[in-house]
Image (tube, rainbow, N blue to C red):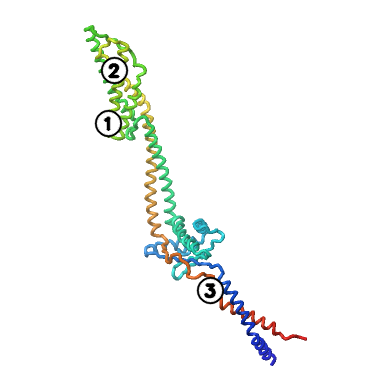
Amino acid sequence: MPENGSSTTMASRLKSHIPLIGLVVCVVLIIGLIHETIKKPVWRAKSSILMAMDDAASASLGSSILQQKTDPQKMLVAVLGSDTAKDIISKKTGVDRDVLEYEVRPDVTSGAIFISYNDPNGQRAIRVVQAAIDTLTKLETEVGLTTASKEAKNLEAVVKSHEAELHSAEDRLAKFQLDSKTVPDPNTPYYSLSYRKQMEILSIEQAKVTREIEVRKTTVLAQGKYSVDIPTGLPPNVRWRDNLIRLEEELRLAKVSSGPDAPNVKKIEISLTTTRQLVQKEIDNYLRSVNQNLDPFISQLETQRILLQYQLDNLKAYDKMANSDALEYQRKLRDVLAPRKALEEVMVRYEIARVRAEAQKVRWSELDRPHLEPKPMNKNLLKRIFMCVGIGALLGGGLALMVSRPKTS
């Protein structure tokens, strides 16, 4: 039979060239082993996460998922595979975005998600997988995977907006209080009445001193010993007058802000007493320079009257400012109270949404930490040997058939 004869002839031809076939197999095997040895290894880093929800969360989440028709496992896979996640991972690891191809594989039966990445640098592969898990945590918080979490995130932005508005209003109020020359009282719409009350007291006291001066003048004129002529108007260029006015206002402010017994109040009172004595001395010198024979008691009373006039003039100036300052203070105080109330209201809604978001949270835990497989994924010595022997045998057999082919005449 021709077919049997042909097969026998081919087998005999191959058998007669076994050394050649063996040589080719050895050459291919050696080349394959050398390539396997020098080939740069590619490492696979992998990790896995597992869906883990308690009963309450599962029930709540289940209701939410039924409404949204979304599987929580698929949501996490979508987040990991999103361009946003890849951009974040690329920035964290330094891996080029175009070559960043990590595998995200869900297992429906167990509820696990397997993450892996191949790279010639094993440590870089681990960093990519770890970055993927970190990014999942970050995006889950920032994006919000449930209705409640999205609501909580939106309300958190509103809270921050109200806080910024409140801080700005508080800063404006504090600056106004610092720059204000009066002491506005939020409970007194017309604070200037307090200045007018002080003016009335000082006016009564000044009138009393004026009467004492007139009585003393009568007595001195009867005795004929001293002069009673005093200059009209206020002394010019009293150096300590501005300091006296400034300290009196500082004392008023300090008593309101710190209390009458505060250390800074006591310190200002001491400075005010010293300054008042200096002003009195300056006024007395002025009076004596105009009339050297002036009665000492009249000089003292006139000095007192002039000091009271200084205080009255100062209070009149502040009285003009007090009303507008009080009204401006109330406006700025309303600017503080409005966002404060709005913040309190939105904080209540935010806390409720945050609790609901926590209850509906897609809960998962890291099952396996990122790690490398024990061997490079692109190196398998046994597989390489079998493959090289097979290829060598085919090449050797083909070569043996070619060299043993009968010559045609």
| Residue 400 screen position, x and y as percent | 67, 83
Element at label 3:
loop
| Residue 3 screen position, x and y as percent | 68, 90
| Residue 321 screen position, x and y as percent | 37, 27
- Splitting the image into 4 quarters, where does residue 276 fall? top left
**N-terminal of the two: label 1 or label 3?**
1
Element at label 1:
helix
Q: Which residue is mark 2?
A: 303
Q: How many marks?
A: 3
Q: Is residue 171 above or below residue 115?
A: above
Label 1 crowd (10 A; few <14 / some 14-19 / many >=20): some
- Splitting the image into 4 quarters, where does residue 16 fall? bottom right
Q: Quadrant of the N terminus?
A: bottom right
Question: Toward the viewer: 282 or 207?
Answer: 282
Instruction: Check whether the beta carbons of the residues at disc 1 and disc 3 lie within 8 A of each other.
Output: no
Q: Which residue is mark 3?
A: 380
Q: Which residue is mark 1?
A: 266
Q: Quadrant of the C terminus?
A: bottom right
Question: Which residue is drawn at the image coordinates 39% and 35% (left, top)?
Answer: 175
Question: Which residue is drawn at the image coordinates 35% and 26% (left, top)?
Answer: 318
- Splitting the image into 4 quarters, where does residue 289 fall? top left
CA distance for labels 1 and 3: 90 Å
**Eye-nearest disc, 2 or 3:** 3
Q: Is residue 227 above or below residue 57?
A: above
| Residue 47 screen position, x and y as percent | 46, 66
Q: Amino acid at mark 2?
A: Thr
**N-terminal of the two: label 1 or label 2?**
1
Q: Amino acid at mark 1?
A: Lys
